[in-house]
Amino acid sequence: MCGIVCYVGNSKAKPLLIEGLKRLEYRGYDSSGIAVQDTGRMDYYRAVGKIVELEKRINGLEINGTTGIAHTRWATHGEPTEKNAHPHRDMEEKIYVIHNGIIENYQSIKKRLEKKGVIFRSDTDTEVIAHLVAENFTGNLNEAVRKAMSQIEGTFGIAVLHKDIPGQIVVARRGSPLIIGLGEDGNFAASDVSAMVRHTKNVIHLNDNELATITKDDVSISTLQATAIKREAERVEWSAEDVELDGFPHYMLKEIFEQPETIKNAMRGRLDKGEGVPRLGGIIPVWDKLKECRHIVIIACGTSYYSGCVGRYVFEKLTEIDVQVELASEFRYRKLNFPPNTFIISMSQSGETADTLAAMREARRKGAHLLGIVNVVDSSIARETDAGIYNHAGPEIGVASTKIFISQLTILTLLAILLGRHQNLSLTEGVEAIRAMEALPDQVQSILSKANHIEAIAAKYHDKSNWLFLGRKYQFPIAMEGALKLKEISYIHAEGYAAGEMKHGPIALINPQMPTVAIAPKDSLYDKMISNIQEIKSRRGPIIGIGTEGDTALKEMVDDFIEIPQTLDFLYPILTVVPCQLLAYYCALMLKRDIDRPRNLAKSVTVE
Ligand code: AGP
């Protein structure tokens, strides 16, 4: 959602804050603002639109302060206008606040404060924080923030500056990430590591209901109840290069091309080839229960949900475990009854998705054990699970998730093989599965080498207003993921459908203006897919076929053919999704979309 970045140290804050905001722009980018403390004054600027608009506003200005806070917004309350952009101030313009999250009781607080004569200048929920801090301020900023935030219901990651207290930033969190960075010549705080990883890899994660006072030489942490906390810094495994473009035009394309490495990272150190048994150290704390588990519920949102949908078929193939997959935003409101020893697996790239977090907490209340498959180390979801498996995929900056999807499929498959090998999966089957997985990076690379061919196909159809994606069994979730990729970055309407459902309605849509992506590798349902393709062909619908190398029959049947290497049925999704990602990317490119920051979207949906 919103991005927060702060700095207090010996260097000028402005360039560090702007650099940090740019790293966070994927989290939300409809307005931004900065407040830099200088002797007896605050340099305070805000702008609507992307960070570049704020840069234009402050370029050339003498902003020399060494303490500052900055924010990039994804609007939740109030239009994306300058008056609603953060930082927000109190009436005396002494308190400056930036906030990521949602305050659920802000109306009642606002009413109470207005009765006391407070005049609000924005439509946001955040502004109440500035006035609450002012109301509680008697000289100690930390205490004023602590008292103010104790009245707040909802989620927050905040940073607060006081105009007359130099060199001090107070930060606090509940439900929205906030990480402190210990730098050489000053200290940072931000919504995520990418905002500061070029300047420090030593970080401290604040937990919920904690706050900290940060100066250039010190960080002191306590709870909202004023209990002091000692917390060691941890070392970040990411590098600054991980968040660079490395010559690619967009992060999304870079991350698509990173996927061979992503698969290797997901498998690194986790394969016991001889025994055909993966080693997943992260689940050791719960292994005794997990190996007896016969019911798993995968919960997630968006692309992570689709990886869970593939995972269900993979578990069905390799284990005796009954797996259901649920949209977190729906699951959390359901009447949940779990069989004993049920495990929840939360799939999440960011580890901060509000719906997934809420669904996990509801499942915990109903007695389930919690596992996480998460990319961001020490994220909220990672910290609330009993155990988990990290993707180790490095930061995914593009709003449209690509490499993490493939990483999630890889890890779900490793988990299924591990559990299967303690059930009915034979050593031979385990060894065969792992051997096939080891071939995947090169196989993905071979598909990437066909990018120009896929771009040419996108050129033929990028002007079509509606697309259909079809698949069966393992490929049905890929059809849905392919449609989501196209929708979210090119803004073309697309539907992912189970091919078997065509005759139950969607076939009425088929027309020469509507391309169908038919995902038909040589798997157990290939023949059924061929029938569907023929049904579409007989109604003159253009077909883009994704099929196994050498399948000349399919190639002749379709208008455009993208071939992928042969693999095991349950591994095909890791290959078939790559052409879908590239089709979406090239269509969006030709339509001149803002590919890394599509309209209305944010990388991490930390609000409901
Ligand atoms: C994927 O391309 C989307 N950006 C979105 O659906 C995303 O997968 C979803 O919001 C879940 O995010 P998470 O994996 O960080 O929980």
Image: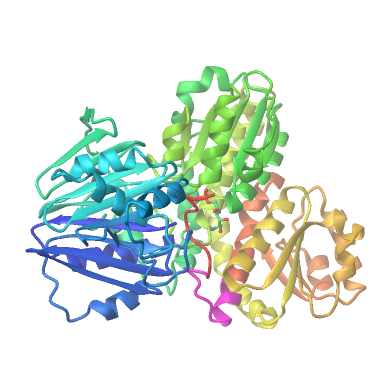
How many numbered circles are shown?
A: 0
Please, which colouring scheme is shown? rainbow
Q: Residue at x 58, y 37 (%)?
A: 359
In the rendered structure, the answer to whether residue 585 lies left or right of residue 324 reads left
Q: Residue at x 33, y 76 (%)?
A: 52
Q: Residue at x 82, y 50 (%)?
A: 525
The stretch of residues the image draws in magenta is 585-598
In the rendered structure, the answer to whether residue 237 lies left or right of residue 498 reads left
* Residue 416 covered by magenta stretch: no
Q: Is residue 380 above or below residue 600?
A: above
In the rendered structure, the answer to whether residue 200 lies left or right of residue 529 reads left
Image spot of residue 185 (x, y percent): 10, 54
Foreground pick, 101 / 55: 101
Image spot of residue 547 (x, y percent): 73, 62
In the rendered structure, the answer to whether residue 97 lies left or right of residue 174 reads left
Foreground pick, 527 / 240: 240
Where, by quadrant of the figure, is residue 341 drawn?
Answer: top right
Image spot of residue 250 (x, y percent): 44, 71
Where, by quadrant of the figure, is residue 144 drawn?
Answer: top left
Residue 85, visible in the rendered structure? yes
Q: Residue at x 65, y 47 (%)?
A: 571
Image spot of residue 3 (x, y percent): 36, 58
* Residue 586 covered by magenta stretch: yes
Residue 579, visible in the rendered structure? no
Foreground pick, 168 / 245: 168
Quadrant where the N terminus is found in the figure = bottom left
Q: Is residue 608 above or below residue 548?
A: above
